[in-house]
Amino acid sequence: MRHDLPSTDGMQRSLRQCLSNMAAMLYRQGHVLETVTVAHRGLDHHALKALNAASSDWPPCQRILENSQAATWNDQQRLVLTSLGRELLFDMFGEGAADCA
């Protein structure tokens, strides 16, 4: 019996784990989920440096988010979640966890 996960399942599991870790890291640094779920907000370079300094887990998490196209840079050059990232985040934590209304 084969137990290998297809690469898309493995990537989604890794991405979900990353989103969960991201939420915890954001909260520890005083951010809320809306920081990354609202397209005109996002994490600026100063906030990213602080997250990087606070946790060695941040750089690989950011890479996973960007490489999977769950995060991108907005017009203000801030890191925000894409619709894919928001959809997974809301699926995991519930839409009320990061209300955009």
Image (cartoon, rainbow, N blue to C red):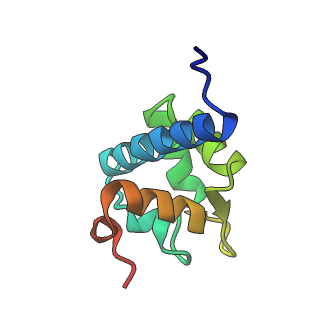
- Residue depicted at 57% across the width and 19% down the height: 3
Quarter in which the C terminus is drawn: bottom left
Asked if 8 appears above or below 85 in the picture, the reply is above
Residue 38 locus on image (x, y percent): 48, 74
Residue 20 locus on image (x, y percent): 40, 44
| Observer able to see residue 43 | no
Q: Is residue 70 left or right of residue 94?
A: right
| Observer able to see residue 89 | yes
Q: Depth check: 79 or 47 in front?
A: 79
- Residue depicted at 61% across the width and 64% down the height: 78
Q: Depth check: 77 or 90 in front?
A: 90
- Residue depicted at 34% across the width and 69% down the height: 95
Q: Is residue 5 left or right of residue 35?
A: right
Residue 36 locus on image (x, y percent): 48, 63
Q: Depth check: 53 or 19 in front?
A: 19
Quarter in which the N terminus is drawn: top right
Asked if 67 appears above or below 80 in the picture, the reply is above
So how many labels did they put on this image?
Answer: 0
